[in-house]
Structures are given as structure tokens and as C-alpha cells.
């Protein structure tokens, strides 16, 4: 149907597979769910990616979020270059870490103190340990379809019964670990209530993507998120907002600000590192003081607060805080894209749902509203595959999975969006 010249990527993928499991360092990159060969990227600038076969793509994943102001932004590059001349790591405190922490504390609601780590996974894993240490309880509630990184406690999704013990999603996760993770469906508060009733004073934390981005973009219903807050307060359970994706993307104050809901602990990643490996978790002082060396809950990292990573993150957050209109601009662009896609889809007889908030948007090939993991799974994956490869061949890089949100970056122009919509029309007419 559509043809992409990717000979060099194919060759590189074969080479990679010999020495890296599946040829990739993170599974989604391998294109397993859409088939075909992943493209290998040579470089990127602004809104565009360039692959090893010299194909150009408008980038709608923005490194899964971080590149919110576009690739190779001069302010980030300058910060990284300047810092790297002073050495790449010390393992000893720097002023930069405090400046970065002060900046985050000033921008993020309900964050009195923050600790930096190296990934979103580490942030969520550590936040849960902290919540457990603080409450002296073992169990946590997570929602099916919400992703909190790949640490053991989180690799558990919905079986059929939400109130049963979690079943590990990956070999290597022990039944013991899984049994401390309780599951509920996103947007279903009755299941959460049932779990609280059943495990009264055993639930340390509820962890949630306040706006889910790992089953497509799925918005929380107002009552669901409000009641989560109320239930956690009632049972003295720590409410953890996983804002790895939404933090500094939906607004400077993240989903907490957009939804008007206060979390007890918040995790960050992606945008906060400006494209370098940074995660962070923060929250109320009373809870954060439980962390070592002040408190008993151990958590550490040789490269945590790494000076180059901090300089990139600081430059990113500083840029965003001085250019708050970026959020409005991103929202305008995303709404424009949504409206254009809707018009095209309405002219076809394909089933579709488009979910969108701020600069997050996802298209699902299903007739029913997508409000949780079950409804997201109803999407037609054959249509998605054809759509994905069609768009790729036209120079539009979308997430290679039906369960991922697109992340717009502000380097994308309205001309880029018009080009995208023209390609979209061409592609969906042939899938
Ligand atoms: C990406 C992501 C993570 C994991 O972050 P990594 O840096 O990939 O470890 C955790 N939670 C959410 C919501 C994410 O989107």
C-alpha cells in the first residue's frame, strides 16, 4: 500500500538483534505490535526526526514526552555543553541540584521536598517504598492499563476480577510481590471502595496516572479522581500521582493543577530531564523526611542528580516557566489536529474515538468511548497497524502501539499539522 525505503534501518536492526535482546533497549521500540522494522534515527532537530535512510518524519512522540520544546533546542544544548566541560559526574553534592529542586518546588503543587533519580521507574518504585515505610502498610492499589515503570510491584494488570490478588504480568515477578498489588479499573471508584473495605488498614498507597497515557490518552472522570482523593484521606493512604508523563507537559503544575486535585506524593520523569535520564519524586515534607539519611526508608543512586542531567532539566524547566504560553500554543495545535482528524474520520465509515487533553491525544479504532483499559483494548489492531505504517511512509512518526498517547512538541508548526492531516486523509482512505 505505502512503501518506506528503510534498507539501512533493516540492516542496523539485524546487527542490533545479535547483541541486544530484540535489538532494542526498550521493547516498544521494536515495532512488535505493529510489525515491520523499526527505523533507526540519525539525528533530530525541532519537530523533525531523520533516519539512517535519510527519511524525514514529523515527530509525534517527542521521545515519549521529554522533547516538549522540540529536538536539539539551543538552550538545552548550551546547558549540556557548558556543564560537560566541567566534568560529567562527581558523586558529591552540587549547587545545581539545589537550584533544580528549588525550581521544581516553586512550580509543582504539593511538593515541599524532592529527590532526583535516573528514571520514571525508579521514581515510582521509590515513592511506593516511601509510602509503605511511612504508613507501615504493605498493599498498594494500581489501575489496569496504568504504567508506572517496570519495577516488580507494577508489572501487574487486570485479570478478570479486580478485587482478586494481582497476577504477575511478566515471569520473574514473584507471587508474593504480586499479592501486595491490588487492581482496579481506571474510572471505576466502586472497585476502589470495595478494596478499601476489604483491606481496611492495609493499603499504603494508591498510585494512579491522573491522566492516563499508557492505554492511549484516557481522561479521569471528575468524580473518580475526587473520590480517590477523599478515600485516601479517609483511610490515611498515600495518594501517589504518577506524573512522569503529565508533569510539566499538561501544565507547569501538571495534572494536579489541571484537575485541581492535591496528591501526597508525585513522581516525575520525561520532561523534567530535558531529554536526559532524570526521574524525581516529591511531596509533603512530613512524608519526604522519612527518606534516608534523615529517615529510615533507604533510597540511593550513584548518578542521581547527575550534573549534566540536572543542567538539561534545569534549562528545560526554566524555559517552560519563562514561556508559559507554550502550554496554550500546544493545546491550540493539538485541538487543531483533533478537529482535522475528526473531520476526516467522519467522512469514512471506520469506527473511531479520539481522546485528547492538552498536548496528549490518541486515536482508537473503536465505536465505544475509551475510558479504561478494557475499552482501550476494543480498538481494532489491524486497522491500527495499517494506519501506523501508512503514516510512517508519509513521514509522520506516531507511537508504534495503539496503547500510547501522541505527545506534541511546540516545534511542530501549523504547516506541519496541515501536512499531517493531508497524509492522514490519504492513509485512512486506504486502510
Ligand atoms: C514512562 C513512564 C514511566 C516510566 O518511566 P521510565 O523513565 O521509562 O522508567 C512511569 N510512569 C509513567 C506514567 C510513564 O509514562
Image (cartoon, grey):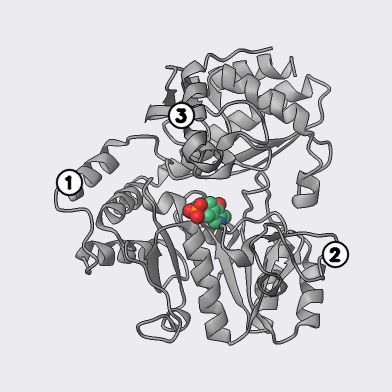
Q: Which residue is mark 1?
A: 82
Residue at 69% across, 75% down: 176
Foreground tag (3 vs 2): 2
Q: Quadrant of the N terminus?
A: top right
Do residues under tags 1 and 3 come within 8 Å of each other at their CB atoms? no
Q: Seen in the image, is 165 located left or right of residue 152?
A: right
Foreground tag (1 vs 2): 2
Q: Seen in the image, is 63 located left or right of residue 75?
A: right
Mark 1 residue's CB less than 8 Å from ligand 1: no
| Marker count (numbered) | 3
Helix, strand or loop at disc 2?
A: loop
**x%, y% of residue 262?**
56, 69
**x%, y% of residue 258?**
56, 56
Q: CA distance from mark 3 to mark 2?
A: 43 Å
Q: Which residue is mark 3?
A: 412
Helix, strand or loop at disc 1?
A: helix
The answer to whether residue 428 of the structure is visible from this angle is yes
Q: Which residue is mark 2?
A: 161
In the foreground, 115 or 181: 181
Q: Seen in the image, is 330 located left or right of residue 222?
A: left
Residue at 32% across, 47% down: 319
Q: Which of disc 2 and disc 3 is earlier in sequence?
A: 2
Quarter-wise, where is residue 222 in the image?
bottom right
Residue at 75% across, 19% down: 431
Do residues under tags 1 and 2 come within 8 Å of each other at their CB atoms? no
Amino acid at each position: 500500500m505505502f512503501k518506506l525505503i528503510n534498507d539501512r534501518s533493516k540492516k542496523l536492526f539485524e546487527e542490533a538483534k545479535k547483541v541486544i535482546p530484540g535489538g532494542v533497549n526498550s521493547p516498544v521500540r521494536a515495532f512488535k505490535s505493529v510489525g515491520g522494522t523499526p527505523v533507526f534515527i540519525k539525528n533530530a532537530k525541532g519537530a523533525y526526526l531523520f533516519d539512517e535512510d535519510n527519511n524525514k518524519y514529523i515527530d509525534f512522540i517527542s521521545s515519549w514526552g521529554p522533547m516538549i520544546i522540540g529536538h536539539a533546542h539551543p538552550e538545552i544544548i548550551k546547558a549540556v555543553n557548558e556543564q560537560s566541560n566541567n566534568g560529567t559526574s562527581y558523586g558529591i553534592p552540587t549547587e545545581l541540584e539545589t537550584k533544580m529542586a528549588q525550581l521544581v518546588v516553586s512550580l509543582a503543587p504539593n511538593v515541599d521536598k524532592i529527590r532526583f533519580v535516573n528514571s520514571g521507574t525508579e521514581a515510582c518504585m521509590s515513592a511506593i517504598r516511601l509510602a509503605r515505610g511511612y504508613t507501615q502498610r504493605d498493599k498498594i492499589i494500581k489501575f489496569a492499563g496504568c504504567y508506572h515503570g517496570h519495577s516488580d510491584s507494577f508489572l501487574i494488570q487486570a485479570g478478570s476480577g479486580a478485587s482478586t490478588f494481582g497476577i504477575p504480568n511478566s515471569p520473574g515477578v514473584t507471587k508474593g510481590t504480586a499479592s501486595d498489588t491490588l487492581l482496579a479499573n481506571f474510572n471505576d471508584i466502586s472497585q476502589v471502595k470495595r478494596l478499601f473495605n476489604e483491606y481496611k488498614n492495609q493499603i499504603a498507597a494508591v498510585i494512579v496516572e491522573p491522566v492516563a497515557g499508557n492505554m492511549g490518552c484516557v481522561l479521569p472522570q471528575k468524580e473518580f479522581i475526587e473520590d480517590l482523593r477523599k478515600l485516601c484521606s479517609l483511610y490515611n493512604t498515600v495518594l501517589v500521582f504518577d506524573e512522569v508523563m503529565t508533569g510539566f507537559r499538561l501544565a507547569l503544575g501538571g495534572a494536579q493543577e489541571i484537575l485541581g486535585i492535591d496528591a501526597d506524593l508525585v513522581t516525575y520523569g520525561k520532561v523534567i530531564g530535558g531529554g536526559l535520564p532524570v526521574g524525581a519524586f516529591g511531596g509533603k515534607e512530613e512524608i519526604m523526611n522519612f527518606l534516608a539519611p534523615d529517615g529510615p526508608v533507604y533510597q540511593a543512586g550513584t548518578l542521581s542528580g547527575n550534573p549534566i542531567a540536572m543542567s538539561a532539566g534545569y534549562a528545560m524547566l526554566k524555559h517552560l516557566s519563562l514561556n508559559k504560553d507554550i502550554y496554550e500554543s500546544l493545546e491550540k495545535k493539538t485541538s487543531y489536529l483533533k478537529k482535522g482528524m475528526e473531520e476526516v474520520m467522519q467522512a469514512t465509515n471506520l469506527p473511531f474515538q479520539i481522546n485528547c487533553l492538552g498536548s496528549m491525544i490518541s486515536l482508537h479504532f473503536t465505536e465505544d468511548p475509551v475510558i479504561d483499559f478494557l475499552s482501550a483494548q476494543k480498538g481494532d489492531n489491524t486497522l491500527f497497524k495499517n494506519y501506523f505504517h501508512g503514516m510512517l511512509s508519509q513521514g509522520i512518526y506516531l507511537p508504534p502501539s495503539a496503547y500510547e498517547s501522541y505527545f506534541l512538541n511546540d516545534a511542530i508548526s501549523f504547516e506541519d499539522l496541515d501536512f499531517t492531516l493531508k497524509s492522514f486523509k490519504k492513509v485512512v482512505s486506504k486502510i
